[in-house]
Amino acid sequence: MYSAAISGTGLFTPESTISNDELVAALNAFVEKFNTENAAEIEAGTVEALAPSSNEFIVKASGIKSRYVLDKTGVLDIERMAPSLPTRGDDEISIQAEMAIQPALDAIKAAGLDVSDIDGVICAASNMQRAYPAMSIEIQAALGLEAGWAFDMNVACSSATFGIDMAAAAVRSGQAKRILMINPEICSAHLNWENRDCHFIFGDVCTASVIEREDLALERNAGPVWSILGSRLRTQFSNNIRNNFGFLNRSEAEGRSEWDLMFKQEGRKVFKDVVPMVAKMIGEHLEEYDLTAADVRRFWLHQANKNMNDFIAQKVLGRVPNEDEAPVVLDEFANTSSAGCVIAFHRHSRDLAVGDTGVLCSFGAGYSAGSVIVKRAA
């Protein structure tokens, strides 16, 4: 058995950003138009009036101030309220594969490796743009990886931590020396931008991580090496976060509305269920390695909601965390599903010293939750 480590990470962000003020202006214009066009039905009580939003509401509810998106124009167009992405032919590179290339190359370079050193690719994300061929295999081909293997996996917002665990298992067993784990999240495409309670939540991004044999990474001495001490994964079925889009939709006897096929959640129920579940999981995971919360230098938590992160960290630490202990990136990125904790790690890990311990943690639909304990080895 070999030890596994994270030796490089990469991050892709789209060129376009949408501030809360821009998003609110578009939603409120849509709300005014809808309420005006349906004034008679609203007066009769057969249609419910839509409520406007505000920057203050969004920040208080989530801590989010901005988000990156692949297409800004379509989202802010009140006649569309959805991204407008180009249709690509079968002979063109897919959008998710294209957005994976830059962070993948950056992660490989950060690890001091060449593309040919990679033995396998795992594409782990909350949504894939098609069923097959696998996105991971297209990414493998686009990178010029002629050998090895690739597969897709989906555990919603926990896909990255589950992906790290799968990659580490392949490395420990000797099945592979190095795995590239990719998280291409196009969350803007499954979000109901007309809904005040969720229109602000998501953004688009792609992260990449190289997981390899620790001894090989240390020999190379190319940059920071994070030994993966262990992972803990948990799932528990819940309908409180759901996305109904799938290939069977066209076969259903009764058609669904467009928005019934998009992301939806019972936010308060999720908060009540997930916070104690994740805090308990982290505590038990640390105990397994004879660690306490005080031994953890930094928590890179899933960037879904600042209030949730603060409560989880407070339950684990016994006090409110400061931003050095649990850095926040969702104010800039919003919720980027599985990529969130990897962004936090990518942005806020190099300052830690050799011997420092940290925890990457994700949680989301399923429910699914994953924690990965790492220790800086070099």
Image: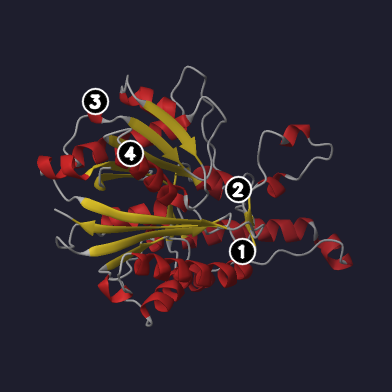
Return the x and y of residue 296 as percentages of the image width and height: 28, 69
Task: From the image, tell me which residue sits under label 3.
Answer: 116
Work out which residue is located at the far bottom of the displayed protein and give it.
Answer: 319
Tag nearer the camera, 3 or 4: 4
| Residue at x-position 51% and y-position 57% | 234
Q: Nearer the viewer, residue 1 or 82?
A: 1
Q: Secondary structure at mark 3?
A: helix
For badge 2, the amino acid type reads Met
Task: From the image, tell me which residue sits under label 2.
Answer: 81
Question: Disc 1 versus disc 4: distance between alpha carbons?
Answer: 45 Å
Work out which residue is located at the far top of the displayed protein and give it.
Answer: 91
In the displayed structure image, the side of residue 342 where residue 131 appears, left or right: right
Q: Secondary structure at mark 4?
A: helix
Tag nearer the camera, 1 or 3: 3
For badge 1, the amino acid type reads Asp
Badges 3 and 4: C-beta atoms under 8 Å apart?
no
For badge 3, the amino acid type reads Ser
